[in-house]
Image (cartoon, grey):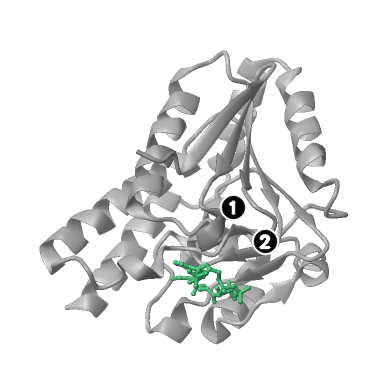
Amino acid sequence: MPNFIDAERCEDVLILRLNRPDSLNALNTAMRDELWQYLMLLRDDFSIKSAVLYGGGDKAFSAGADITEFGTAPSIIDARAARENRDLWDLMQSLDTPLIAALQGYSFGAGLEMALYCDLRVAEHNALFALPEVKLGYIPSAGGTQTLPRHIGASDSSMMITSGNSINAEKAYQIGLIQYLTDHSQYLQFAIDLALEISQMNPKIVRAIKRSVRSSEMEISEGLAYEARVRLSLSR
Ligand code: COA
């Protein structure tokens, strides 16, 4: 069985690479299952102090959900998958271990939504960001309607979600979607260095800070459940 995610440990940092470069690291069911396993590891293994998530190849972090899997499941399976989806994203947003997304090329759809669950986003100058679901007749369903406004506000979120158009790295930096902008040759090492720096801090304090920052927002679990209900009501 192919690995769709590779993991490597660097000191106390876990480095995860999405590994479907020929499909621009599109998230298929098997990759989602592997991501679930790694997120559980991050939740349970306290010796891992921070993690980096990046996309293999040189074109994309991830071009989103695997569109070749769309419409292939009967509705009852689809509904179950939607629940599992929500659990995956709920697990990701509730992790206490700091996550850093290292973004190159395309971060589209669920690719961007995954990055939005990370605490820090480092991107290279050619990176592009979009939630293009509206163009395919869907709403974002990996939490994007809830997470994007929390990061960049309702106005820029509406611009991105209702048009489905991409924004470039400069714009993403300007509106606070990413916090660090680097050359392509540096973005990954930059993210790893940040993760190593965080891993030197007292992990109890870092985890407490994450919990505390999270509780400063409205209950996101409710928002994710609401988005899932809207999505299911549209598929009836
Ligand atoms: N799911 C499955 N496969 C995907 C994919 C996705 N979301 N995005 C890209 N791929 C595949 C392409 O089918 C292509 O495969 P092929 O070489 O076997 O034909 C390969 O990845 C390269 O993509 P390509 O479209 O040739 O690259 P590009 O640089 O011309 O365009 C994008 C890049 C991201 C603009 C374009 O691939 C795209 O629009 N993808 C869909 C993005 C999307 O809608 N995501 C949200 C889904 S809800």
Choose between 149 and 85: the one closer to the eye. Answer: 85
Does residue 114 appear to the left or right of 83 in the view shown? right
Q: Which element type, helix, strand or loop, lies under badge 1?
A: helix
Q: Residue at x 33, y 46 (%)?
A: 87
Q: Residue at x 20, y 63 (%)?
A: 78
Q: Position of residue 153 (x, y in %)?
A: 64, 68
Callout 2 amino acid: Lys
Q: Looking at the image, which is closer to me, 59 or 164?
A: 59
The circle drawn on residue 219 is none
**Residue 77, image x, y percentages:** 15, 59
Is the shortest distance between ligand 1 and the CB of mark 2 under 8 Å? yes
Quadrant of res 176:
bottom right
Location of the C terminus (image quadrant): bottom left
The amino acid pointed to by label 1 is Ala
Relative placement, left or right, of 98 versus 68 is: right
Compute the Cα span from label 1 to label 2. Answer: 16 Å
Q: Which mark is residue 59?
A: 2
Q: Which residue is mark 1?
A: 115
Query: Is 12 located above or below residue 21 in the figure?
Result: above
- Check the picture and name the quadrant holding the N terminus: top left
In this view, the residue in front, 141 or 31, is: 31
Q: Is residue 135 above or below residue 13?
A: below
Element marked by disc 2: loop
